[in-house]
């Protein structure tokens, strides 16, 4: 990775501006969204969260008391609702066990220790754990997702054979100031670029704000 990532960040921020991500009213809502967004789009997640909000259930204790079938019905718009209901319940039970749902207390723990604990919860992988740490906990952890890997590979900032989640995350964090807001905005802008321009099957390189950062000959095939 030979590029100046701070320069890339500055270019994107100048072009796209602040992203105001993650869209949520509370840190707990961020956690719910981080679980429900697995393998679906945000529009579907928003419907599920709105259903929980309409029933005044965006609280860990209230979700913990729900019948599983009721929870499944409420989050059905997010897809894979039976799997996600179990995962959400596992996270909620963990939150109650660890801090009685008091998230301020939870996020005062050392980040590395908390991340390890999150990864031990059923259904929580690296991307979900890091989204919780960054967007709910305001902790300086960079989230790597499919858009990150696609954009970095196509631009030659990472080798296709060297996109292990933790290795790529470590390299990015090493090359950027360790700043929560910067990580927040950078990841959100990468998602925006991935959705709008750097699409999986039909990239729009000619219109992309990052077109000047492509290697000679254009985007690398992945």
Image (cartoon, rainbow, N blue to C red):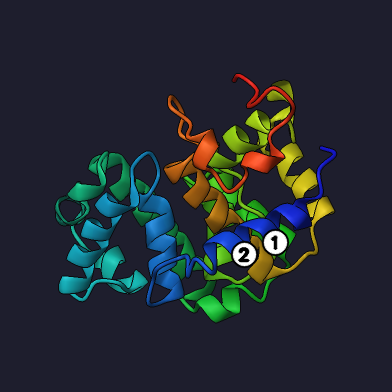
Q: CA distance from mark 1 to mark 2?
A: 6 Å
Q: In front here: 17 or 180?
A: 17
> For mark 1, does the 10 Å Cα neighbourhood hold few (<14), some (14 to 19), or many (20 or more) residues?
some
Going 71% across and 21% down the picture, which residue do you hit?
161
Q: To which residue does mark 2 refer?
A: 14
User: x%, y% of residue 189?
Assistant: 55, 55
Residue 168 occupies quadrant: top right
> For mark 2, does the 10 Å Cα neighbourhood hold few (<14), some (14 to 19), or many (20 or more) residues?
few
Going 48% across and 51% down the picture, which residue do you hit?
192
Q: In front here: 69 or 3?
A: 3
Going 43% across and 24% down the picture, which residue do you hit?
201
> In the image, is residue 212 above or below residue 135?
above
Which SS class for mark 2? Answer: helix
Q: In front here: 206 or 142?
A: 206
Residue 195 occupies quadrant: top left
User: x%, y% of residue 90?
Assistant: 40, 53
> In the image, is residue 22 above or below residue 43?
below
Q: Is residue 120 visible?
A: no
User: x%, y% of residue 17?
Assistant: 54, 67
Label total for image: 2
Labels 1 & 2 near each other (Cβ < 8 A): yes
> Residue 180 got which mark?
none
Q: To which residue does mark 1 refer?
A: 10
Q: Is residue 90 left or right of residue 10?
A: left
């Amino acid at each position: 990775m030979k590029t100046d990532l701070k320069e890339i960040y500055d270019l994107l921020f100048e072009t796209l501006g602040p992203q105001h991500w993650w869209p949520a009213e509370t840190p707990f809502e961020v956690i719910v969204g981080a679980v429900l967004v697995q393998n679906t789009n945000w529009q579907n997640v928003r419907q599920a969260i709105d259903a929980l909000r309409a029933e005044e259930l965006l609280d860990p204790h209230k979700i913990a008391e729900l019948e599983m079938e009721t929870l499944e019905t409420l989050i059905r718009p997010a897809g894979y609702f039976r799997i996600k209901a179990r995962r959400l319940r596992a996270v909620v039970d963990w939150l109650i066990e660890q801090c009685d749902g008091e998230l301020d207390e939870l996020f005062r723990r050392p980040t590395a220790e908390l991340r390890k604990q999150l990864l031990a919860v059923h259904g929580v992988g690296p991307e979900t754990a890091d989204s919780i740490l960054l967007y709910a906990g305001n902790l300086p952890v960079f989230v790597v997702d499919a858009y990150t890997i696609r954009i970095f590979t196509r631009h030659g900032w990472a080798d296709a054979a060297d996109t292990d989640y933790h290795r790529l995350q470590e390299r990015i964090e090493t090359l950027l100031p360790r700043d929560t807001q910067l990580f927040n905005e950078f990841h959100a802008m990468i998602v925006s670029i991935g959705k709008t321009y750097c699409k999986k099957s039909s990239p729009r390189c000619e219109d992309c704000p990052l077109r000047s950062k492509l290697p000679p000959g254009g985007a690398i095939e992945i």
